[in-house]
Amino acid sequence: MLESKIPSGPIEKKWEKARFDFKLVNPANRRKHSVIIVGSGLAGAAAAASLAQQGYQVDCFCFQDSPRRAHSIAAQGGINAAKNYRNDGDSIFRLFYDTVKGGDFRAREGNVYRLAQLSVNIIDQCVAQGVPFAREYGGLLDTRSFGGVQVSRTFYARGQTGQQLLLGAYQALEEQEAAGSVKMHPRSEMLDLVLVNGKARGIITRNLVTGAIDSYAADVVVLATGGYGNVFYLSTNAKGSNATAIWRAHRRGALFGNPCFTQIHPTCIPVSSEHQSKLTLMSESLRNDGRVWVPKKKGDTRPPSQIPEDERDYYLERRYPSFGNLVPRDVASRAAKEVCDEGRGVGPGGQGVYLDFADAIRRMGEAQVREKYGNLFDMYEEITGENAYKVPMRIYPAVHYTMGGLWVDYNLMSTIPGLFVAGEANFSDHGANRLGASALMQGLADGYFILPYTLPNYIASTQLEKVDTSHPAFAATKEEVAKRVATMVNVRGKRSVDSFHKELGKMMWENCGMARSEQGLKINLERIPALREEFWKSVNIVGTGEELNQSLEKAGRVADFLELGELMCLDALQRRESCGGHFRVESQTPEGEALRDDEHFSYVSAWEWKGEGGQWELHQEPLTFEYVHLAQRSYK
Ligand SMILES: Cc1cc2nc3c(=O)[nH]c(=O)nc-3n(C[C@H](O)[C@H](O)[C@H](O)COP(=O)(O)OP(=O)(O)OC[C@H]3O[C@@H](n4cnc5c(N)ncnc54)[C@H](O)[C@@H]3O)c2cc1C
């Protein structure tokens, strides 16, 4: 059933071969074809602009008031590319190798190699758009290092890389909107997918201002709707990020790939209160110059300045001398959890470790540190009231990114014909752990360089009958959506939507977070369905469905999280190995590192929805490694 469609031949020629084999659509015929793109973050905006520029009629949807507010704007640290401007040993093969190894050998080699190849084009594309990447004194583009690699291949625009890249993509999108090839639909939330004869042919949306339920038809649908880290309630994602679009498509037949693969980022500002609703990332780029440490002694409450050098444990440098503070995120997060569990954590509740810039300031001076990371230090001070030029930052791991998502083949098509998925919304090329600065690379590769080839190939090679919103499938799906919204509003119970979300998030963090055990996962698999049942009996949504209603918007998203959370736990329970960010306590090396079981789990898990009440069927896509030797990951 699962055909990955990876082209045959040597790895460096696969993408070229695929592009040659793809069917083309004649320029005069392109305007006869329509594409719906849900999402206008980096992946969606890049795809919409590129396909419109080719001549297709594009309708692009987002729930924010402007594409410029997509969550991609939050990306701080940078974007990887194998340009080797530093002449420090980088190459396409090395980026490919680092990514497969960083993902703990749970990604497809063919996809990752293509990603590494395309990385170099992305930088050229963005520079041509005017994205103001940081430059060195001589005018060349500057780079820095991110975790899990030993070269300097991360291009950046201070701590605002996502914002600058999004402005580039947005300008390209606006150009096409002005030309009449893109119609933008802001404040519109996709609530279902419409299938006609088994193919994706449209979507149902709710207008978030008026509450109107609308239908849209097209030849192809692309979902570029971002990640689902907010299932944990507390995460570094934008509060609006959600799973609804991909979840609704999953329920219509799209298989869900590796749902339990979640990334916990090691450098976030620690939780400070029960009432908190959002966590803030301190970019990984800070680990280029900041040193991570905790006191050697348990329960040491002295201020950091009073703890002498020989009483500090720079535990990452000690345990991983080759990579030091730049070990990958999963490794750094687990190490932080371990020292805190030992009672050596710092700050309120002992849930924190220091990220110290004193050495960097001594070495390069405060002005240079400010130049590189100024906005991050300012943000830290605004949130904590502490000046990190004077006292070390306090950081702790937090949910940040989801490697899981809808399963797609090499062409980024899901198991529903005509439904493509791009960016963080697909199960992606990062395996069980994403390396820093690789999400922007993947989203832009998908949008600017992959979909513009694979989607026309689908159009050119598929019999697409004429369909518009008068087809009965649209009326039927629309009715289902309207009924669901009305049912939710009419519960009129006693509990707020947030209280359900918080409770689910807590369960997910405790039992499906940084460490997962059979016992904990089984507890969640009992408690989540019960919570879901309670939600449908006692959620309280104030107001009506026929107006701007943020409580209703949240409720729809939480209802979907309550199903997705269960699938994540099921997937985590089924994968009885540890790999990357998926750490099963039963499967670890004597040093406490993740212990893979390649014999039994070297596959992508792709789950098929089989109906209400926690019924799924598992399909496996076997992973084979021809170019990167399967080995226990080591960063020592
Ligand atoms: C704080 C932070 C910092 C990061 N820093 C980096 C970094 O430095 N480098 C890096 O590589 N990665 C970074 N990442 C990860 C990266 O930012 C994201 O993975 C990436 O931006 C996702 O892009 P996207 O286009 O897939 O989705 P998003 O940018 O999340 O866009 C999703 C789009 O879909 C729309 N949408 C969603 N659901 C619906 C719906 N139902 N109906 C209609 N529209 C919908 C939204 O309106 C939005 O337009 C960071 C992540 C965080 C949280």
Image (cartoon, grey):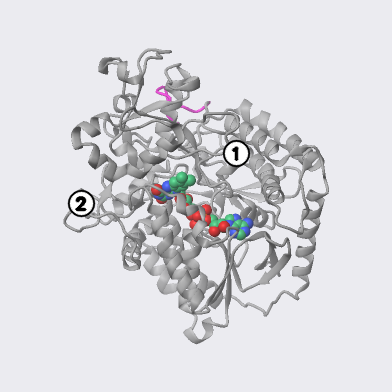
Q: Quadrant of the C terminus?
A: top left
Name the residue nearer the viewer: 382 or 513.
382
Magenta part of the chain: 586-594
Name the residue nearer the viewer: 157 or 429.
157
Q: CA distance from mark 2 to mark 1?
A: 40 Å
Q: Earlier in the sequence, mark 2 or mark 1?
A: 2
Residue at image coords 61%, 50%: 243
Name the residue nearer the viewer: 63 or 50.
63
Residue at image coords 28%, 54%: 134
Q: Which residue is mark 2?
A: 86
Residue at image coords 25%, 52%: 142
The residue type indicated by label 2 comes to: Arg
Name the residue nearer the viewer: 616 or 516.
516
Q: Which residue is mark 1?
A: 233
Looking at the image, residue 383 lies above or below residue 161: above
| Residue 346 seen in render | yes
Q: Residue furthest left?
A: 138
Contact between marks 2 and 1 (CB within 8 A): the answer is: no
Q: Residues within 10 Å of mark 2 (few under 14, many from 20)?
A: some
By secondary structure, the bulk of the magenta-drawn segment is best described as loop
